[in-house]
Image (cartoon, rainbow, N blue to C red):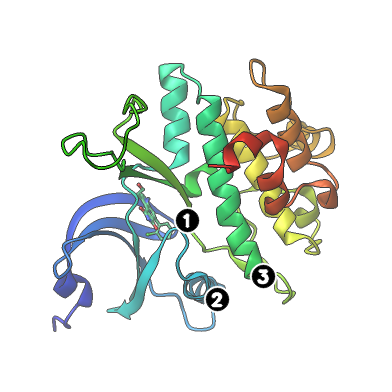
Amino acid sequence: ETSISRYNAEFVELDLLGTGSFGSVYKCLNRLDGCFYALKRSTKPIAGSLDEKMALREVWAHAVLGHHQHVVQYYSAWAEDHHMLIQNEFCNGGNLNEKIMQNRLEKVLMEIVDLKQLILQLCKGLKYIHSLKLAHMDIKPGNVFICHVQRKTIDESNSDDGYYGDHTELKKSPYDTVYKIGDLGHVVSLNKNQKIEEGDCRFLPIEVLQEDYSNLTKADIFALGLTIFLAAGGDDLPKNGPKWQVIRNIGLPNLENRPKELNSLLQQMVSCNASERPSAIEILQSSFLGCLTKD
Ligand SMILES: Cn1cc(CCO)c2c3c(c(-c4ccccc4Cl)cc21)C(=O)NC3=O
């Protein structure tokens, strides 16, 4: 019998955004509020299975993380006809991996001012997650979602708005770019020593591979360093083998035509010794972002 599906009752399914081992993600329109949402629909995991633990961790993490500008917003989750659904904020700009691929195709490099924004915003998101005693454990370009939001333009028409500026500061783009950390499927709590589900091995620091979970926030910093490296124009990362070992033991190759401050920040973020990696808070305070954080 056709059981009443909340999914069909409350949403209009518009596009398939992606599929994977996790299930399928659709862009949906909520019939009531007229907003778009990203809905992940996956087969309901077997009770007591590892998949169920991970699925519950994802929902618990979203519930604990509440609202933050640089974490993808969670709205609801429910189960129906052998499926589990999670309703998240829809980010209309794709993900950072698609942007990196696009830049390579067009042979363009992210400008340093945009890289600084990327680092600033992701560090604010990580600072928030870490402040709640959680670690993301799967930071990578594919899990950084992009929102293009309408720029707050000063309305030129009513010149008596008390704004006597010259209005020439209009930026080239009609929108601001907001980066958000998403996919909380690997989130772990810092204190509880639980078996972690490793994230993408290209972004995994060696100590986590060796099951040293004493510094999980610094595992996120390591993965963030590699994520920024790729966004700044670095070559693809190895999944294993000697090149994988070199990054863990020696560090990253220098990015030419990038400021030495950026290269040294990246080197620190991927330090072999987790305690030498700067925390999200330290990066926000670092001189590299200095001129930026005073906005
Ligand atoms: C494949 N895919 C494409 C998109 C659109 C990006 O412009 C997307 C989103 C999400 C997710 C997602 C990831 C992990 C868990 C749950 C969701 Cl809804 C997946 C997404 C999500 O949470 N929000 C999204 O926009």
Cα gap from disc 3 to disc 1, whole angstroms? 17 Å
**Tag 1 residue:** 182
- Per the model, the C-alpha gap separating discs 3 and 2 is 19 Å
The residue sitting at 28% across, 39% down in the picture is 153
Mark 1 burial class by Cα count in 10 Å: few <14, some 14-19, many 20+: many
Q: Is residue 179 above or below residue 72?
A: above
Respond yes or no on whether mark 1 lies under 8 Å from ligand 1: yes
Q: Is residue 164 above or below residue 72?
A: above
Q: Nearer the viewer, mark 3 or mark 1?
A: 3
> At x 58% / y 37%, what residue is drawn?
292
x and y percentages locating residue 227 in the rendered image? 59, 39
Determine whether label 3 and label 1 are within 8 Å by CB.
no
Q: Residues within 10 Å of mark 3 (few under 14, many from 20)?
A: some
Is residue 270 visible in the rendered structure shown here? no
N-terminal-most mark, 3 or 1: 3
Q: Residue 124: x percent and y percent?
A: 57, 53
* Snapshot quadrant of residue 57: bottom right
Query: Is there a contact, CB below 8 Å, between mark 1 and mark 2?
Result: no
Ligand 1 lies in quarter: bottom left
Q: Residues within 10 Å of mark 2 (few under 14, many from 20)?
A: some
The amino acid on which the numbered mark 1 sits, given as a three-letter code, is Gly
Residue 127 located left or right of residue 59:
right
Q: Looking at the image, how many numbered discs can be counted on the residues?
A: 3
Sequence order check: which comes first, mark 1 or mark 2?
A: 2
The label on residue 133 is: 3
Q: Is residue 97 above or below residue 27?
A: above
- Quickly name the residue at label 2: 53
Tell me the SS state at disc 1: loop
Q: Nearer the viewer, residue 8 or 94?
A: 94
